[in-house]
Image (tube, helix red, strand yellow):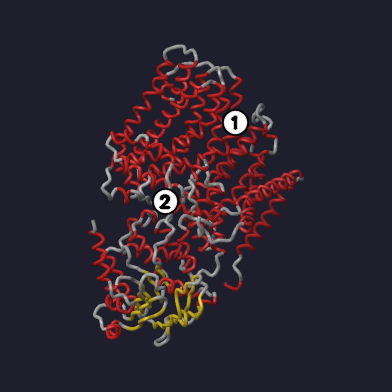
Amino acid sequence: MLASNGESVISLRNLSVSYGNTKVLDEVNFEVQAGQIIGYIGPNGAGKSTTIKAILGLISGYSGTITILGHDVASGNVAYKAQVGYVPESAELYEALTAEEYLNFVGILYGLSEDRAAHKAQALIQLFGLDEAYRSRLSSYSKGMKQKVLLISSLLHNPDILFLDEPLSGLDANSVMVVKDLMAELAKAGKTIFYSSHIMDVVEKISNRIILLNHGTVVADGDFASLQDRAHEESLEEIFGHMTGFLEHQNIAHHALEIIQDH
Amino acid sequence: MREFYSLRILDRFQGALEAASYDYGLLRKILQVQLTMDSRRVPAILSRTRKGRNNASLGVDHNAFIRSLWFYALLGAIVIPVVMMTRHILFFMSSGMAILMFLVMLSMISDFSSVLLDIRDRTLLATKPVPTKTIAMARTLHIGIYLSLMTAALSAPALVTAIIGHGITFFLVLAAMLVLMDLLIMALTALFYFLILRYFDGERLKDFINYVQIGLSMMMTIGYQLVGHSFQLFKTHIVFHPAWWQLVIPPLWFGAVFEVLFSHPRGSEVFVLAALALVVPAVVYGLYLRSMPAFERRLEKLAATSKQTGHLSQAWQSLYSTLFCRNPVERQAFVFGAAMMTRERDFKLKVYPMLTMAILFPLIMMVNASPHHLMQGLSSSHWYLSIYFLGLVIPSAVVMMQSSQYYKAAWIYQTTPLPSSALLHKGVLKACLGRLILPVYLVETVIFIAIFGPGIWMNLIVAYAATWLLAVIAVLAAPQNLPFSVPYQMAQQRQTYLFFLFGALSLGFAAIQYAASLVPFGLYGYFVVLVIVTAWSWRKVFGIPASVQ
């Protein structure tokens, strides 16, 4: 069910979202082709999570068109969600359940058979080193363990598109490496990964395209090299600062020190 | 931040606390912050009324606890007749103290356990250079303030009765006894938790507290039903026989003090008991103060928990769910719903008391209806129809299973391609009928067959079939939300109306069943009709619309 070369798997046209009088997204446009890893970055409150939520149909009041794998999101047909995986920013889970129960339930919601869901969940849990806690309630899990459960739940149904909102938060260094390699493998297998994070080093290394959002509009879109050219900066961190008009971090730090040391 | 009256009273003890090397300024500040946070908390005893919840959700800065004090005062009125008695002072004052002690103890466990076991402030306080001793004292005083307020409210009727009926000395002695009682309760509860935490994990302790809370809600509702019967006690003649086991009954110690001071005590036993009333609280409280810092450290265990579900319960679960559901989506929804309903403490707190009452209420009513020739006339009566009390639980369960402490996790419904939520609703509703209602129904069945004989079996089966129809009506009448997807505060908007609707419906079903049983084979005919109507309505309500298939 993969889109052929050149055809967009994700397409946003004039996407705008308002909460009350505040415009969170203002005329966002971009097309995403299969097999890309897209780093979706921007300052706090720029509208990153809102974009992802709109694409997944979690927000109904938007204007513009969102097309996923050729389906209009607003049409009300939810079948496209079987090809989409999602890791939300905050790890909200039904914590009264065990990981096993939660993953089996999610598998069924994605339309997998019970056996298949159970089998895949158990195998992935083992790979992520959670087998001992598999039958414990999620309420006893640490932040990183919950994050792993979320990642597994977004992959159970072999999705073609992945939306990951801060997927590495809380993970230990080893798991971070596993997840980064896994993303590269998934992209090689033709899957599209839409990835949002605040850790610029990671985004710089794994993305083959970066979209920078500021105040609800796209301010930069391209591969890392083209962004370097445009901003005349070396690292993504500096490019980020340059593009969002934030150049006084050293000044602020200096003032902060003065206040801390004030007697 | 508000200036609290209780803190101004505390200020008078500043010298004493500083002499005991506590940092008073720090102590006061910690208490002030905690009291401010509490003004946004709802006590368990009131959480089932709408007023308490609204304040909590609006974040109104009035301590809901203070506002609920009148409720405790009302509850305390139960001891007025006991305190009024002038004869048999040992017996009646012991009984009075026993009732008060029982009520204070239950509230202590259900409402103040959260204060005693609060570890959220640990990351804030324990990481700063604040001495453990001061933190422990702040905790003690924090509970102490509430406990004395509650005891004052609860014993206000008793105290007023004492001053009118027995004079000022009696009143002062009663007040002193209540203080000793509070010290004893507080120390015992803390030491008991300390003991549990030593051998079990925090999850177990929370479960224990949850069951006490369930017991409390239940006790409130049925307590007054039994008051009528307790008055029969007054007719009997009471003689005090000393025995060794009386030494371990605290209310008796307090009662003995009154006997010594205001009556004509016979025998040295009463003096021993009265002495215990003074010595034991002092000793236990001293022990508590000494072990408080160790208790603080032990609280760490509350954060780390693990509970494994065994393979056996897993196998049993899948077998049981297969019994009710054939469709895999529905079956997983059943497993999901059953797990949530049997594990989430808030759900249990709200629904389990009603389930227990569905068993107890019919029995209480039967006893009230025939107090003298108990059980004799019953077997030929139609009281077994009171099994329809179960019908009252259904709307509450149906509304409550839309809410969860983890309601934010409901995003999962929207990111998955489930075309219709009908199977989800159906599975969770079946879990409610299979895992909550059926066990209660079976217990009731055993009791009723013991009372009325096996001849009523058809009646019981028809009544169970009716719960399935009532359940589907509840789904139609209740607000439409996905399972476990709204916060608890939102859940109970239409509860009262539903409660009365289902009271009338249950009564109606019981009446129809009674009418059917008058006709020969009428019950069988009615059963067939009921099953057909139920099956049809389930299909109608949970049918997947053709457009999304």
From this view, report whether residue A97 is shown above or below residue B177. Answer: below
Q: Report which quarter residue A200 is drawn in.
A: bottom left
Disc 2 marks which amino acid?
A: Leu
Q: What element carries label 1?
A: helix
Chain under numbered label 2: B
Residue B481 image offset from top left, x and y in percent: 55, 61
From this view, report whether residue A72 is shown above or below residue B56. Answer: below
Name the side, left or right, on which B76 lies relative to A247: right
Q: Do the residues labelled 2 and 1 touch (CB within 8 Å)?
A: no
Residue B320 visible in rendering: no
Disc 1 marks which amino acid?
A: Val
Residue A125 image offset from top left, x and y in percent: 34, 62
Mark carried by residue B227: 1
Alpha carbons under labels 2 and 1: distance apart: 45 Å
From this view, report whether residue B266 is shown above or below residue B256. Answer: above
Q: Which residue lies furthest to the bottom in this view?
A: A6
Towards the viewer: B134 or B18: B18
Mark carried by residue A53: none
| Residue occupying image coordinates x 32% and y 56% | A132
| Residue occupying image coordinates x 68% and y 50% | B505
Residue placed under numbered mark 2 in the picture: B312
Residue B105 image offset from top left, x and y in percent: 45, 35
Towards the viewer: B56 or B527: B56
Residues behind callouts 2 and 1 on a single chain: yes
